[in-house]
């Protein structure tokens, strides 16, 4: 890829049109893009990236603010890049999406993104040469020509600023993280994880298949009645199966022969049975014919009776329907009587329509009691809260009485303790000073006895520091030597990890025509890591030695300053004198601390009781006030609930009573509707029976029923 010319307008920090002629800059084959921080170097690289792919690298691409804030509102944001890829020269022009002031009125409107690609020279063979104006088609064309996606271009061509220098100065762990970030090695980790997971799954499948195979062998051996061998199970199974097949074929032939003989025997038996049945049938029919000839008159009378019975069958069927209708009517009347007992006396004689209207009115009354039911629930909550508040007030009253009883004698006891304490405070004051003097002298004596030991420790710390400095310097030089050799052979190490068909972690290409070869004396990453760890260990030891030396020097200096030139002999004499003075003062002020504790404890208890009484009084007042408010609310709600409750114990019971009465009215209405329907059916069926008797030629229904016969 070769860049020829870049133009950008209102892009990044440039409010006007700026252009870069890369042909003029690169006439000598190489040019340097330099400038102060904030001069716009990165913006030029962003403009090239935006022209090619429509996005910019890094966090700047996530913000999506490419327009210059200082540009004239009428100036559009534009980037134009002329370049050659391979032998194909083109010009790409892009306009990003941004907000601009409306031409009419106030506010802003969104300027849509646009892109175009025009061929300056010959287009590639797979393109027709027409200008490309769709954003997605421009991106696909550029990606196909470059052979890289935007992310690959950013990783390989536009390495993020500062990250490669950080890589050169980083330790092994940091370099690993930077390489992963720069070259996207996470995809290789994903492949590695896939292989590990795939291996685990295949191992589980293999174990499952082996378990199935062992179970199959056990079942096969059980069916064959043999024990499986230790080895050659498949051959044993084949032989056993072959023997079973041979046994089966022999048994099948024997069964076929037996089946054929059985079929012939069954055919002979069927012929004999058919002949026997025919003989018996002829004999039976002959006997019946003789009987019928003897009963000719009786048969004629039976024919006449049968004809009348057939004519009466329709009458009898209609009569059965009439009887069923009467049974249903009787059942409906009983249900009506039972339903009438469940309604009010005033509603018992009303027709079905009025009963349904009455049920609707009762349900409406029950629905109107919903608010009263909620009020009753709140009333129960108020009563429960009143009980709790009353208990709280009583508990506060009991606590006040307990506090008053305990507080009664405490002030007089406090005054007595204070008088006793004043008598012991003079001795206590001198005692504190004497203890301080004794402690200081004892500490000084101990320090004087430690001085020779601290001086020896200082000399040892200085010697260890000198050794640690030499060791650290040698480790640093060794690490730098290996690090320089490591950097020189890094390209060969990356090339050594390439495999045919796998993408390059640097450029993404799957072809590797000339990978770098490792030279003599190449240093591995493990060697560098070991050198770095050795240097870190030496540096840590040196730091610890320096800290130990400083601490030893500070300890000796502090000890000499605190001794102020005194020796151990003089300090021993001063300590003995201080101990004798301290013993005398302690005996005189033996009860000072005890009396101070007693005074403080008594005063603290008085304060606690006073605070507790104030809190109890406040709790009692609050509980009493809330109780008065709750009683007033309960009384007011009780007046409203009395009207809604009526003569019932509760509003809910009245509501349930109304719903029960409404249900009873609906049941009675349905029963009366059923009775009316059954009565109409009885009358209709009575007429049907009479008509059936006339149509059958009988003088009456009774005559038709008398002629009917039950089927035999």
Image (tube, rainbow, N blue to C red):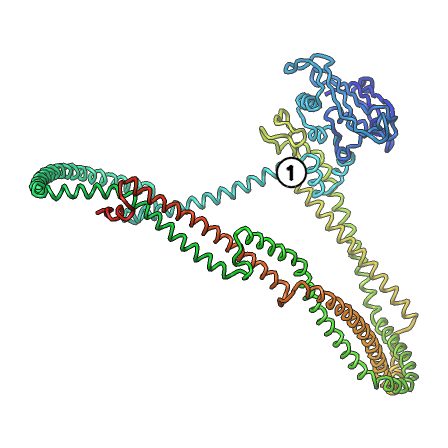
Among all residues in the image, which is located at the extreme front?
A: 699
**Pointer 1: residues within 10 angstroms few (<14), some, or many (20+)?**
few
Q: Classify residue 393 by image quadrant.
A: bottom right
* Residue in front for this viewpoint, 136 or 368: 368
Q: Which SS class for mark 1?
A: helix
Image spot of residue 568 (x, y percent): 87, 75
Give the residue number, with chain letter if any, for mark 1: 186
353 and 493: which is toward the camera: 353
> Residue 343's spot in the image, x, y percent?
53, 60
**Residue nearest the observer in this picture, 286 or 295:** 295
Residue at x-position 83% and y-position 28%: 100
Is residue 173 visible in the rendered image? The answer is yes
Q: Quadrant of residue 50?
A: top right
The quadrant the N terminus occupies is: top right
The picture quadrant where one finds residue 658 is: bottom right
* Residue 580 seen in render: no
Q: Is residue 619 above or below residue 506?
A: below
């Amino acid at each position: 890829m070769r860049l020829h010319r870049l133009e950008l307008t209102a892009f990044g920090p440039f409010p006007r049109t700026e252009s870069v002629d890369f042909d003029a800059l690169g006439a000598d084959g190489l040019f340097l893009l330099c400038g102060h921080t904030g001069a716009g170097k990165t913006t030029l690289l962003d403009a090239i990236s935006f022209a090619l792919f429509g996005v910019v690298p890094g966090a700047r691409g996530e913000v999506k603010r490419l327009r210059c804030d200082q540009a004239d509102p009428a100036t559009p944001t534009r980037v134009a890049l002329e370049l050659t890829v391979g032998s194909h020269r083109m010009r790409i022009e892009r306009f990003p999406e941004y907000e601009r002031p409306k031409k009419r009125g106030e506010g802003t409107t969104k300027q849509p993104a646009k892109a175009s690609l025009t061929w300056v020279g010959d287009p590639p063979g797979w393109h027709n040469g027409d200008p490309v104006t769709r954003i997605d088609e421009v991106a696909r064309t550029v990606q196909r020509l470059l052979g890289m996606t935007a992310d690959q271009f950013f990783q390989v061509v536009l390495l993020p600023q500062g990250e490669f220098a950080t890589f050169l100065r980083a330790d092994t762990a940091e370099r690993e993280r930077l390489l992963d970030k720069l070259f996207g090695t996470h995809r290789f980790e994903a492949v590695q994880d896939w292989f590990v997971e795939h291996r685990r799954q295949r191992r589980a499948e293999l174990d499952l298949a082996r378990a199935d195979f062992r179970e199959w062998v056990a079942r096969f051996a059980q069916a064959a009645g043999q024990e499986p061998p230790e080895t050659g199970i498949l051959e044993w199974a084949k032989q056993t199966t072959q023997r079973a097949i041979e046994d089966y074929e022999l048994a099948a032939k024997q069964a076929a022969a037996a089946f054929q003989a059985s079929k012939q025997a069954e055919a002979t038996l069927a012929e004999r049975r058919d002949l026997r049945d025919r003989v018996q049938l002829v004999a039976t029919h002959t006997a019946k014919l003789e009987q019928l000839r003897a009963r000719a008159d009786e048969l004629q009378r039976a024919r006449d009776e049968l004809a009348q019975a057939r004519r009466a069958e329709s009458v009898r069927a209609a009569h059965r329907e009439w009887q069923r209708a009467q049974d249903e009517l009787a059942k409906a009347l009983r249900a009506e009587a039972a339903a009438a007992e469940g309604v009010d006396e005033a509603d018992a004689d009303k027709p079905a329509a009025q009963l349904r209207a009455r049920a609707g009115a009762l349900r409406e009354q029950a629905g109107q009691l919903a608010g009263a039911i909620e009020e009753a629930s709140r009333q129960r909550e108020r009563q429960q809260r009143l009980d709790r508040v009353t208990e709280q007030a009583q508990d506060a009253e009991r606590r006040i009485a307990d506090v008053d009883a305990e507080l009664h004698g405490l002030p007089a006891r406090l005054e007595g303790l204070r008088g006793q304490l004043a008598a012991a405070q003079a001795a206590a004051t001198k005692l504190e000073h004497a203890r301080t003097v004794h402690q200081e002298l004892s500490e000084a004596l101990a320090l004087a006895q430690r001085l020779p030991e601290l001086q020896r420790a200082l000399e040892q710390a200085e010697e260890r520091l000198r050794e640690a400095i030499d060791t650290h310097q040698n480790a640093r030089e060794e690490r730098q030597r290996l690090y320089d050799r490591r950097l020189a052979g890094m390209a060969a190490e990356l090339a050594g990890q390439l495999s045919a068909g796998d993408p390059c972690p640097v450029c993404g290409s799957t072809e590797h025509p000339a990978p770098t070869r490792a030279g003599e004396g190449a240093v591995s990453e493990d060697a560098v890591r070991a050198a770095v760890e050795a240097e870190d260990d030496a540096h840590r030891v040196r730091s610890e030695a320096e800290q130990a030396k400083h601490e030893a020097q500070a300890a000796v200096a502090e000890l000499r300053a605190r001794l102020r030139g005194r020796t151990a002999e003089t300090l021993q004499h001063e300590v003995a004198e201080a101990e004798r003075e301290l013993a005398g003062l302690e005996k005189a002020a033996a009860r000072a601390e005890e009396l101070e504790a007693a005074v403080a404890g008594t005063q603290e208890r008085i304060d606690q009781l006073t605070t507790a009484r104030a809190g109890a009084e406040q709790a009692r007042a609050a509980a009493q006030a809330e109780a008065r408010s709750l009683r007033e609310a309960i009384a007011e709600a009780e007046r409203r609930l009395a009207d809604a409750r009526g003569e019932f114990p509760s509003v809910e019971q009245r509501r349930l009573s109304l719903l029960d009465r409404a249900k009873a009215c609906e049941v009675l209405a349905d029963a009366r509707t059923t009775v009316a329907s059954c009565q109409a059916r009885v009358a209709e069926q009575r007429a049907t029976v009479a008509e059936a008797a006339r149509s059958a030629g009988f003088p009456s229904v009774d005559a038709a029923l008398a002629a009917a016969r039950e089927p035999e």
